[in-house]
Image (cartoon, rainbow, N blue to C red):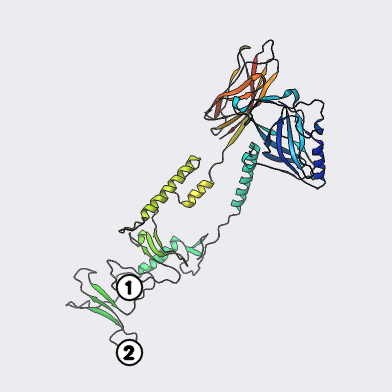
Amino acid sequence: MAFDGIQITNRGRNLLAKAEAGLTKITYTKFSAGDGKLAGQMPVALKALISEKISFPVSRLKIQSENVVVPGFEFSNQGVASGFFFREVGLWATDPDLGEILYAYANSGEGAEYIDAQNTSAVLKKLFNFELTVSNTAQVTVVVDDSIIYATPQDVADALKESKEYTDAAILGVKVPDASTTQKGVVQLTNSTNSTSETLAPTAKALKTVYDVAASKMAPYPDSIELRQTANTAGPAFIDFHSSGTGNDYDSRILASGGNAATGKGNLEYTAENHTFNGRTVLNGNSTVVGNAGVFSLVGSDHVYLPFYPKGNNGGRKAFIGFSDANTKDVRIHNDDPEGDVIVNAKNMGISIAGLFTSANSVKVNVANAILAKGGSANSGMNGEQLAAAIRNLPVKRFARGTFNGQSASSPNTTSGATMNVGVNSMNFLPTMVFIRLRMKDTYGNLYIEGIAMAGIPYDNDVTLYGRFQNRVSIYSISQSPGGFSATINSTDVRDYAGAGSIAVIEAFEWFAYE
C-alpha cells in the first residue's frame, strides 16, 4: 500500500491562511481511513472521505522544521467487524468557523491493502506519519489521547541525551562547603598544638605532641599529696574545705576509709550539698546513686546525652541515650554499631522494637530485590539514602537498530512458500521486543506485501503480515541468542489471479530491538 501524495483540501488551505494571519491556530483532531475510490473527484474539493470505515486519534505531533510538521497515528484492525481495502486516509482539524473539517487527504488507488477483520486474523498494527508544510507563523497543536501516545527510537534517544546533559550540569554545580562548628564540610589539617582556630583540624602528629606532654606530667608521684602514709594504725584520712567563711568545721569533705595491703581497695566519700563535675568524668568500678526522684540529672545548654563505652574509652562510643543535636525535640536511643540492635524487654509491652526493625529490614530486602530485578545494584545492608541512590541509578531500557540489507530467500517451487533464517549477534543486551521490515514479491518483481512485523521474546504466537489474496509473510519463530536474536521468516506461495504460478521471494531489511 502506497499513497502517492498528501493534499491539503480547500477547507484545509483556508484554515492554514487563517492561522498564518494569526486569527487562529491549527489543531489536528483525528485520522480517518476508508476504501473509497476516486471517480473524477478532485481530492482538494473533498469535505469528507468517500467511504470512511474507521477513525484513529492523533498519537503524536513532531515539529520537524520551521514550516514542516509531522502528525502521526497508529493504524490497527482492532474493532474492525468486516474487512476492507485500506485505500484512502484523511487528517481532520478544527476550523473556528466551520467546526471539524477534512484538512488533508490521500488515496492509494489500486495500491490499496486489504485489512482483515479482527476476528479473522491477528491484530494488525502500523504506524503512519503525515508530513505537512505550514507557515512558520502558524501555531500548530494536536488533540491527543495520552493513553495511545508512543515514542519513536529518536524520541527515546533525544530524551536520554537531554537527561544526561541536565545531570552533567547539575553535578558540575555541586560544591562541598567548608566545615565549621555548625556544618559538615571540607577542613584543613594543621600540626599546631596551640591554635585557637575553630576551622582547622589537628593531625596525628599534633595529637601525639600533646599526648607526650600530658604523659610526662604523669610520672610516678609528681607533685603528689600523701595522707597518713606513715601511720601504723588504720583510720580515716580526709581533706576538709572551708569555703563559707562562717567557721564551720567544714563546708565540703573528701573522706578516705577502709582498704588493705592491696592498692586501690579503700573507699572514698564525698560530702557536699552539690557536686559539679566540669568536663569528662570517669568512674571505674561499680557506682551507685542513692536517693528518690531525680537523683541523677544530665544538664546541657542546648543538648545532652548519656554515652556508653562498653570496651573502654579507646574502644570508642558504642551507643547513647538523650538529645544528641542542638535544639532537637527528639529523645534518641542510638546504637552506633551498624550491625547492632536496640532490644527492649518488658512484660505486656504492647510493641516490639525488635519486630519493628525486623519489619523495616524486610522492606529493605524487598526494595533491594526489586532493584536487582530491574538490572540495578543493591543489597539489604544499604540504608535508605543508598537504596534511593540505587533506584535513581537504575539502567534505562536499551535500544538497538540495524539492517539485514535485503537478505532474501526464494521458494523451491510455485506451490510452496519461502523460508529464511536471520540473526543479530552484535548487541550488548538481550532483546524482549523486535521489529523487522519484511517484503514478499515474486521473481518477476511484483510486490505483494511490505510492512514491519513485531514479535515479543519469549515468542508467543505467529506474527504475520497479510496482503491481498491471503498472501502472507511472517516471523515464524524468534528467540534470544548471544549478542542479540535469531528468527525464522517464512511466507505462503504466491497467490494471484488465475494463470501460471510464480516463485515466492521474501526479503528482510531494517530491524529494531528493545531490551
Residue 304 appears anywhere in the view = yes
Q: Quadrant of the C terminus?
A: top right
- Residue at 34% in and 85% down: 243
Secondary element type, mark 2: loop
Sequence-wise first label, 2 or 1: 2
Instruction: Note whether 75 is above or below 386 in the view shown.
Output: above
Dot 2 corresponds to which residue?
A: 246
In this picture, residue 56 sits left or right of residue 383: right
Q: What is the quadrant of residue 217 in the picture?
A: bottom left
Where, by quadrant of the figure, is residue 49 drawn?
A: top right
In this picture, residue 198 sits left or right of residue 246: right
Compared to residue 12, the image places residue 327 above or below, namely: below
Q: Nearer the viewer, residue 507 or 475?
A: 475
Element under disc 1? loop
Please name which of the two marks, 2 or 1, marks the residue nearer to the observer: 1
Name the one closer to the observer, 66 or 141: 141
Q: CA distance from mark 2 to mark 1?
A: 32 Å
Q: What amino acid is at disc 2?
A: Thr
Question: Which quadrant would residue 80 be assigned to in this image?
Answer: top right
- The label on residue 140 is none
- Residue matched to label 1: 293
Q: Residues within 10 Å of mark 1 (few under 14, many from 20)?
A: few
- Of the residues shown, which amino acid type is indicated by label 1? Ala
| Residue 195 pos. (x, y %) | 48, 69
The answer to whether any part of residue 404 appears in the image is no
